[in-house]
Image (tube, rainbow, N blue to C red):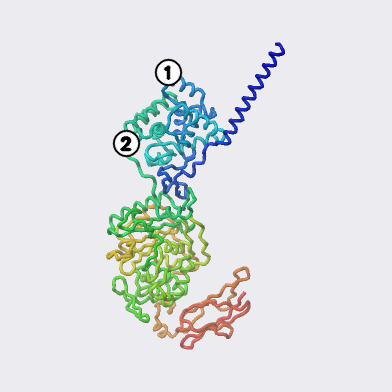
Amino acid sequence: MPASRRARWLAGACLGLAGCAALTGAALWADKAYPPPLDVTAGLSRQVLDRDGRLLRAYAARDGRWRLPVTLDQVDSDYLDMLIAYEDKRFYSHHGIDPLAVARAAWQFVAHGGRIVSGGSTLTMQVARLIEPRAERSLTAKLRQAARAIQIERRLSKREILELYLTLAPYGGNLEGVRAASLAWFGREPKKLTLSQSALLVALPQSPETRRPDRHVETAYVARDRVLGRMRAAGLLPDFEVERAGRAKLSAVRKALPDLAPHLADRALDADPLADSVTLTLNADLQQRLEQLAAEQGHRLGRRQSLAMVLADARSGHILASVGSTGFLDSDRFGAIDMTIARRSPGSTLKPFIYGLAFEEALVEPATLIDDAPANFAGYRPRNFDLAYQGEVSIREALQLSLNVPAVRLLDAVSPVRLIGRLKRGGVALDMPEGGAPGLAIGLGGVGISLRDLVQLYTAFPNDGQAVALTDGLGEPAPLDAPILSRNAAWQTADILSGVAAPADAPRLKIAYKTGTSYGYRDAWSVGFDGRHVLGVWVGRADAAPSPGISGIGTAAPILFEAFARAGLAPARLPPRPSGLVVRNRNDLPHALRKFGGEAIFAEHATGPEIVFPPAGARVDLDAGQGRRQPLVLKLQGGSPPYRWIANGVPLKSTTRRPNLAWRPDGPGASNLTVIDANGQAASVSVFIE
């Protein structure tokens, strides 16, 4: 080759290489300067999930569309195979553009006189169109999508590209994404689709408005069958499966997306306005069952009466279901108000804690007799719910019958302040009457408490007296360290409540429960528990107006039993009787415990006081660790109150009518304890404190 010709060839080659380099550089610059808008999270629907990741409630995106995030693991594998085989069979081998599909589209374009018949779009190109929607359908638009597809393939994995398509593809109306479509058209998550449903979802994005089954069901059938036929021709589905899927009926009704726990879901997203998704401790199945029950009961209750329920795991404190009203949109009942957190009068539902304190302080035992008769407590005259009196009854009967006068007698003995203090140990602060100290009326509902707090208090019974702080997943509650009741007192109280007869016609369940009705028939309550779960029910009007005729036993208790039955929870036995706790009948009780307030018995038998704990000669270890020492609880029986205690010659405190006293020794060593009753009779023991 002559030198001049060689030189021209080299010059041309250099120019060509320079041009290619320039084009490559320009393409790389453009790729960096104009990246595809791949962040679609801001346009997604916000969602609230249950403990297992199931959808409780979804919220439309800002543009009014239902667009739920989805991963490949949440979608049926048969649907994915059908989608790729129908839309882009070389999806996993191309780099955004399928040359064979482009060639086919070009040939069809020429053969049909410049009219686009098939665009040769890959799934990646469709994603490019979805993230940058354009109205025109032209060659220029296709070239732009192809360029974007190459950019997308450089940045995302095939899995991520497919997930973007499944999140953004249109499925009719304001439904976008396969998850919203599956829930709306079939009422199920896309993880378990039938072949018929999968085929329809493959076909819908091609023409979502003309194929949506709620408006054009016949067209939807044709589109579905076309996909099934293509799968048969490709050898992906056998004939018998295609025929069976082709016979399946399509629903012509669009279903509502899950809308469970609306009160709690709203609070969850309000608490974290930037969160796209919030997970709660609720169980979607349990929530749905109890909401269905609440809706059914709403038709039976008065037109303005509402209903609330809280179901909790007593061991973990997780709230498993929370129903705030009979219906969130029920304006007659003020359904938007969450009555699980509204503070109302609890009626008699706090009585078990009064009895528990009386057991703990050895004032009574279940077999002890107590008078149910008119009484005057410094001007406060409690009356029973039915305005009748039973006379002399056992403590067990008094609690099971929810008698008011015996409960007030015991509260007077243990003191309202002490009861309030114990309830605070359960993490609950009551709403007290304005400007007043705790009085005896709190035992009959003269305070304010929410249903949720009441359920939290009742977790003490399945947990040997230790309440557990409830949580719905929104933050971690502070742990409750001190028990509400001793283990023995908690068991004695729960044992009594487990013997309360079930309401007429209620399912026969092995649960313990207590009811309550507030003053003026404004609130009806029932709280029940087994060895693992606590369920609380409230019935009343959200506006606090009276509802004549409602009651805890007649209105709330039947709902409680039905709710427990529908929940289908695994039966859990109540805690066993603590070792060393003896259940005694009345004849086996000491005279001081045979009847509460029975000073006449004491005088008749002329018994002096007897120190029953600590016994004489006992060695008592009060070391609680970390340099702290526990108090020693001194207990006596017999004698006539008030009592005076003396330790090592020094009076411990002013006289007391209680048969026990917490004493904190000065230090280890021998101590002499003496008690003197009102008649001057005394008893003494010597013990050694370690």
Q: Residue at 62% across / 28% down in the picture?
A: 22
**How far across and how far down the image is residue 623, in percent?**
60, 71
Near mark 2 (Cα within 10 A), the count class, few <14, some 14-19 or many ≥20, is some
**How far across and how far down the image is residue 26, in percent?**
59, 30
Which image quadrant is residue 27 in?
top right
**How far across and how far down the image is residue 668, in percent?**
63, 76
Near mark 1 (Cα within 10 A), the count class, few <14, some 14-19 or many ≥20, is few
Look at the numbered disc 1 and give the secondary structure of its residue.
Answer: helix
Residue on which the image places disc 2? 215
Q: Amino acid at mark 1?
A: Ala
Q: Residue at 45% across / 29% down in the picture?
A: 87
Residue on which the image places disc 1? 111
State the quadrant of the N terminus: top right
**How far across and how far down the image is residue 653, in percent?**
53, 83
The answer to whether mark 1 and mark 2 are in CB contact below 8 A is no
Tell me if I can see residue 589 in this picture: no
Which image quadrant is residue 646 in?
bottom right
15 to the left or right of 634: right
Q: Nearer the viewer, residue 81 or 315?
A: 81
In the image, residue 284 sits, relative to residue 248, either above or below, namely: below
Q: Amino acid at mark 2?
A: Arg
Look at the numbered disc 2 and give the secondary structure of its residue.
Answer: loop
Furthest-front residue in view?
Answer: 4
Tell me if I can see residue 239 in this picture: yes
Q: Nearer the viewer, residue 671 or 272?
A: 272
Sequence-wise, the earlier of marks 1 and 2 is: 1
Q: Residue at 61% across / 76% down in the picture?
A: 689
